[in-house]
Image (cartoon, helix red, strand yellow):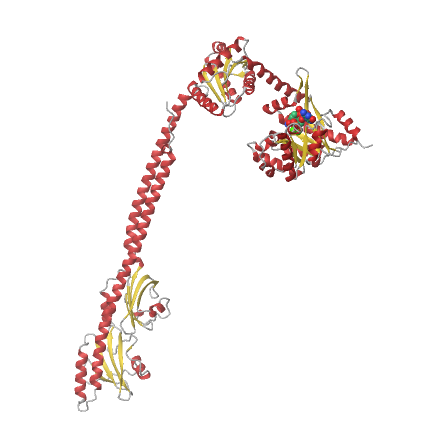
Amino acid sequence: MARTRISFLTKPVVFLLAGLCITLATTGVVAVALYQMRLDAMAQARDVAENLAISLEKEAERTLDIYQIAMRNVMTNLETPSPDLPPETRQFLAFNAADAVSDLGVIIATDSSGKVVLDSRSMQSSTIDVGRRDYFLVHRQTPDIGLYLSKPFMPITKSDYDSIAMSLRRADANGRFQGVVAGTLSLRYFRHLFDDSILGENGSLTLIRSDGIVLMRRPYKPDDIGKTLAGSRSFPPLMRSDHGTYIDVAALDHVERLYSFRKVGKYPLVVVAGLATRDIYAGWRKRALSIGAVTAILDALIIMLCLMFSAQLQRRLATERQLQKLAWFDTLTSLPNRRRINREAHRILADARRYSSQVAVLFVDLDRFKRINDTQGHAIGDEVLSEVAQRLRRCVQGKDLIGRLGGDEFVAVLERCDVHKAARVADRIMEAMQRPIAVNTGRGVGIALGVSIGIALYPHDGRSVDTLLRNADMAMYRAKNAGRNQMHFYASEYEHEAREHLDLEIALQRALREGALQVAYQPKVGAWGMVHGVEALARWHDDKLGTVAPDRFIAVAEESGLITELDTWILEQACSQLAAWRAAGLDIPTVSVNVCAADFKRPDFADFVARTLQAHNLRPSDLTLEMTERVMFDESTDDIRATLESLHAQGITLSIDDFGTGYSSLSYLHRFPVQELKIDKSFVQGIGTSAMAESLTQTVVNIGHALKLTIVAEGVETLAQRDFLSRHGCLIYQGYLYSPPLAPQDFARWAEARKPS
Ligand code: C2E
Ligand code: CA
Ligand code: CA
C-alpha cells in the first residue's frame, strides 16, 4: 500500500482556515459596500438639501424683490416734487403701485411722527400710528440703514400669523426724516412656501434674519418665531459665507440634521434647509440590516460546511492511519512488521552508503518459546511476546529500528554502529531478558527466557538487506547450537574483538565500583626549575587483564559512558592528594585533572567541582581542568559553555590539551574562557627531526602569546627539545626529561628531593 500523501489539502485544519478566510473576505466586502452606501446616502441628502436651499432662496428673493419694487414705486409717487399734483391723486397713484403686492401683504407710508398717511388696503385716510414699531424707530435713528427687515410682530389687524415689515426711509431734499414706507409681509406666505417642500419626517426649514432672529420655521411652532439663534454653535459659520452645508444638532428641537444654508440675495436673510440624519440613513439602515442578515447566514453556512468537511476528512484520515498501522505494524506487539522492517532497513542502508558508515543487523530469537506456547497456551505466549517487545524497545536508541518478523523472531537494525556498539546492544538485550516475565498464570510465577542473537555488519557481512538478514539469521543459529542464550557475530574475526571489548567494559565497571584504579602524578616544571603544578593521570592494573593503557580504557569508558564516573573519582582523589601533600609540607601550586565533554554536560558539574574543592579546603585557583579541543565542538555547545563560564567564574583554570591536533580553528579560543594551552607531545617530539613539527610548535607558542595564555609543552624528553621551546618562549614543561607519571608516594619523594636545602 502506498503511504498516504500528506499534502496540505489533506489537512482538516486547512478547510477550517479556508472557510474562515472566505467568511472574513465576504464580510469585509459587504462592510465596505455598506459603508459606501452610507456615504452615498449622505451625498444624496446633501444634494437634496442644497437644491432645497437654492429654490427657497430664489423664491424668497423673487418675492422680496417684487415687494421692494412696489415699495419704491409708492415712495416715488409720494415724493415726486410735482407741486400741482393734489394729495388725493398721489394717494391714488401710490395705492395703485401697491396693488401689485396686495395678495402678499400691505404697504403703508407714514409721516415723520409715525402716523400712517397711506395704506394699500384702502383709499380712505388711515388713523393707524406705527410710531412705536421697531422699523419706524430704526429709520428715525439711523439715516443710512437702507432697506430694513423688522422683527416678527403681530399686525394691528390681528391675523393668525406674525408678519414682518420691510421698510425704507423717507427723506426730504435736505435728507431730513419724513417717515417711512413699509411693506408688511404675512409670514403665512413663507409658511406655505415651506410646506410644499419635501423634507422627510424630521426635516426643517428656517428663515433667519442675519442677526439670528428666527422669522419662520418648519415644523411650525409659534413659540419658535422671534427666538434668536445668535448664541448657537453653528451660527457664526452661517454668517461667514453666502452658502454652505454642515451637520449639527438643532438648538430648537435637539434633532441632528444635515443643514444647507444660503443668503437671500442682498437681503439680510438666510434660508436654512435641514434633513434629519435619522431620515437620511433610514433607507440605508433598512438595507444594511437585510444585507447583514443575509451575509451572516451565508457565513454561518460556509463555516458549517467547512466544519462538516474537515470532520469528514479527519475521520477518513484516522481510518487511513488505522489501515496503515495494520499494514505496517504487528498487531500483537505494535512493533514494525516484516514489510516495514524491510523498507526501513533499505533506507538505513542507503544512508550508510552515502555516509560510509557501518550498520548492524541483530537477529533476536527467543530460546524455547515453543515450549511456553505449548504448555501455557497461546494467550500466555502472546503476553510473553508483548512484554519481550517492550523490553526490546527499551534496549535500542531513538533512531534505531526494532521490529518483529513473526513468531518469536525479532530484528534490530542499528545505524552508525560498529562491532563494539553492536555487542553492547546485544548484551543489553540478553540482560533485559534475564528478568523473569510475570504473566497472568494465577500462580504468581514468572517465566524466565533466554535469547540467542546473531549479528551481521554492513558492509563487511553483506551489502543488501536480504544478505544481511540471512547472515544474521545464520549467526543466530550458531549461537543456538553453541548452547543458547548468547550472541554470535556472522564473521568470526569480530567475535574475539567484541568479546574483549565487552570484557574490558565489564572489568572497568567493576574496577570503578571497587575503587581499584590508581592515579599517577606528573610534574609540570618551569624554566628555572620550580614545580609549576602536577597532572593527575588515571592508571589501571587488572589481575586478569594486566596493566591496561589509559588510551585504551579511557576510550572504552568514553564509549560506555563510564567516563564521568571515572573523572569524578580522579578529581576527588587528586584534590585529596594535593591537600595531603600540602599538609606534609610540600609546595605544589596546582593540580591538573583531565575532563571530557560528557563531564561538562552534567548540569551539576560546576557545583560538584566547587563542593569537592571545599571538602578539601582548596581554593579554585588550586585546580586546572584539562580538556581537548573536541569539547568545544560538541553538538551541545550551549550546555558546555554554560558550565565552562561557571567554572571560570569560580576562578578555576581551564586548559586546552593536545592543542594543535584537533580542529585548528582559533575562533573558539576567543569564545571560551580558556587560560592555558598544552602543546601536543607529537609536536614536541618532532623538534630536532621535523621542520614541520618545529614550525607548528612555534605557531602554537605565538598563538598562546597573542592570546595571553600560559603555554605548557608536554612530552618533553630531551634537553634539545626544552632549549628549543625556551628559545621560542615556552617556559613550562612536562615530560620524562623531568619525571614520568609517578605513584603518589614516589612523586612525594621526587618533590622532596628537589626542595632547595
Ligand atoms: P594527556 O592528557 O595528553 O596526558 C599526557 C600523556 O602523555 C600521558 O599518557 C602521559 O603518561 C604521557 N607522557 C608524559 N610525559 C611523556 C613523555 O615525555 N613522553 C611520552 N611519550 N609520553 C609522555 P597517559 O597517561 O597514557 O594518558 C593518555 C591520555 O589518557 C591522556 O593524555 C588523557 O587524555 C587521557 N587520560 C588519562 N587520565 C585521564 C582521566 O583521569 N580522565 C580523562 N578524561 N582522561 C584521562
Ligand atoms: Ca592532560
Ligand atoms: Ca596531552
Quadrant containing ligand 3 reads: top right
Q: From the viewer's perspective, is residue 633 above or below residue 135?
A: above
Q: In which quarter of the image is the C terminus?
A: top right
At x 64%, y 37%, the residue is: 702
Q: Tally the numbered discs.
A: 0
Can you give x and y, in whole percent of width and height, for residue 158 in the image? 24, 76
Can you give x and y, in whole percent of width and height, for residue 324 in the image? 39, 24
Give 585 or 323, whichever is nearer the viewer. 585
Give 80 or 189, whichever is nearer the viewer. 80
Q: From the viewer's perspective, is residue 461 above or below residue 58?
A: above
Can you give x and y, in whole percent of width and height, for residue 737 in the image? 72, 27
Left or right of residue 382: residue 535: right
Give 190 or 284, whichever is nearer the viewer. 284
The image quarter containing residue 467 is top left
Q: Can you see residue 185? A: yes
Outermost residue, bottom side:
84
At x 28%, y 48%, the residue is: 290
Can you give x and y, in whole percent of width and height, for residue 49 in the image? 27, 62
Give 303 or 227, whichever is nearer the viewer. 303
The image quarter containing residue 181 is bottom left
Q: Quadrant of the N terminus?
A: top left
Q: Can you see residue 674? A: no
The image quarter containing residue 649 is top right
